[in-house]
Amino acid sequence: MKLHQALAKALGGHGTTHLYGLVGDANLFMVNSYVEAGLGRYVACTHEANAVLAAIGLAQAMGQTGVATITHGPGLTNVVTPLAEAARGGIPLVVLCGDTAPGDLQHLQKIDQREVVASTGGAFIEMRSAATAIEDLDRAFRIAAHRRCPVVFNMRVDLMWDDLATTSGSAPVPACAMAPASGHALEDAAGMLASSRRPLILAGRGAASPEARSALLALAARIEAPVATTLKAQGLFHGERFNIGICGGLSHPVASEVIMQSDCILAFGVSLSKHTTEERAYTKGKRVIQVLPDIQETPRLDTPTLRLIGDIAGTARAIEELLDMAEIPGSGAVDDDLAARLAAEAEAFAEVPAAARTAAGTVDFAPALRRLNQALPRERVLVADLGRFVTTAWRNLPVTRPADLVYTSHFGAIGCGLGQAIGTATAIEDRPTVLVAGDGGFTLSGLSELVTAVREKSDLVVILCNDGSYGAEHVQFTNRKMSPELSMIARIDFASTCATLGLATVRVTDDASLDAACAAIAERDGPVLIDLRIDPMMIEM
């Protein structure tokens, strides 16, 4: 067996159902072997950045390690931003990257690839030889899964046709089982809850498993506490009577009141970033118990009153057992009045707000999104690119489970949405992917990648926030009463442009065309693009 065949087989052994990539001379034979052996679905992208972003999107939506492949030199430098995005987001990713032969000093694409990867915060694993290649690849998958980070697997082009004397199978990534937190810290946590009159249970993406959800709801019922989530865990408690929704800048008025009145926050799988705590306004003066599933540090970790490390579900059950042993009564923090207020919030959200007057040929953004929300299937994946529109998108297009919210803003880069949407739309088959992007970020991401969505017959709905400007910069200028001219970009006719690529398109400029967009969503049989024309002076931040 040739090395390129063995590498492809090893990918199958690691459960790589989807491989995203762009072929070059250093990886094309490996990709060909993966396809010919029927090991999974290869999705060919038009740009390396979008191939890696697609793998990131899959990793978030499927809860598994994403896998992409690129060639050497410029292939690698093209993915620096996606690698940084994955590193900042703690997303497990393996990128099989070709490399030039070490003796070929005049090769046009020769660079120090290890240094490039180091600058992104990703890990780098060298394929030492053909004989150790599968062992090296196994290590890359282990590091990606256990450290939750991107790993570039560096494979030399001159070794691809080497014969392997033996072809041992890949070693599966071992499961990492955590025990519940225990000892004095656990007892202290139970003591804090015992004295709390208004406890709140807050869950993050680290507590998004079905087992953790069940345990947290049982604990919430035991201590009579409302439940909330971070943005990235949105939908975890969907349908629960005392679910107050998102804790942070997207909190609705009732949720904000409940959070501010709480005296103890029990945060499971939450980093307590400034976006969740509203710059600590939500945690000031409160006891905060943070339970994390591992010891990985991130820049977003805030300092709680008490931190526990242990299995999320097991720790929640252990706290409940301590409270039962001490015969601690419930707090009484939830009642019929709170349930009625939350029901009223839900009823208000179901109504489309009245639209404000905007410039001719544009629509009011938030009401338009609310109408599109009603037209879309309730079960969908939301991928929101970064821009001043993003919080409005998150607020008005909610999801019903955490895996359905793909977060693209870990590195603060616009243009990461389309690639990640390609990943989710090609991997998730029981619900559509909805991409919300601004005109600047969408153009930056490469319109050519829409060809991939059309070729793959992806169930993708693109809602394009087309205000003819780079929004954050527009705000900076106008807030200082300066001319926003430098932030303006040409109004691209995305509807006409994308129709030539094979998408169904609708340009929304008024109520009638908004109705047409809703109809296009209902009647779709492939990718749909909605060119939502909005007034740059009116868009909500």
Image (cartoon, rainbow, N blue to C red):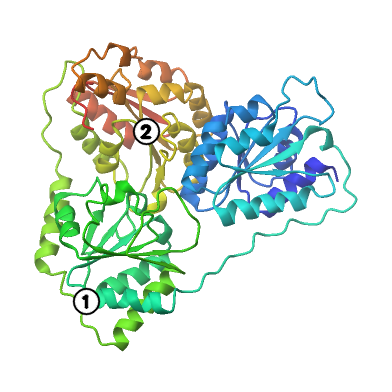
The residue under the point 28% across, 38% down is: 391
Q: Quadrant of residue 343?
A: bottom left
Q: Is residue 526 visible?
A: no
Q: Residue 433: x percent and y percent?
A: 41, 40
Please tell me which of labels 2 and 1 falls first in the chain. Answer: 1
Of 260 and 539, nearer the camera is 260
* Quarter of the picture holding the C terminus: top left
Category of crowding for the residue at label 1, using alpha-carbon neighbours closer than 10 angstroms: few (below 14), some (14–19), many (at least 20): few
The residue under the point 18% across, 27% down is: 364
The disc at residue 217 is none
Of 531 and 113, nearer the camera is 113
The residue under the point 83% across, 44% down is: 129
- Above or below residue 239? Residue 476 is above
Q: Secondary structure at mark 2?
A: loop
Given the image, on which type of amino acid does mark 1 rest? Answer: Ser
Q: Are marks 2 and 1 in contact (CB under 8 Å)?
A: no
Q: Secondary structure at mark 1?
A: loop
Q: Residue 462: x percent and y percent?
A: 37, 31
Category of crowding for the residue at label 2, using alpha-carbon neighbours closer than 10 angstroms: few (below 14), some (14–19), many (at least 20): many
Tell me the mark number nearer the camera, choosing from 2 and 1: 1
Q: Is residue 18 left or right of residue 86?
A: right
Q: Residue 377: x percent and y percent?
A: 32, 45
Given the image, on which type of amino acid does mark 2 rest? Answer: Leu
Q: CA distance from mark 2 to mark 1?
A: 42 Å
Q: Quadrant of residue 388?
A: top left
Q: Residue 339: x percent and y percent?
A: 14, 63
Q: Is residue 396 visible?
A: yes
Count of residue discs: 2
The disc at residue 386 is 2
- Above or below residue 297? Residue 525 is above
Residue at the disc numbered 1:
195
Q: Is residue 243 left or right of residue 431?
A: left
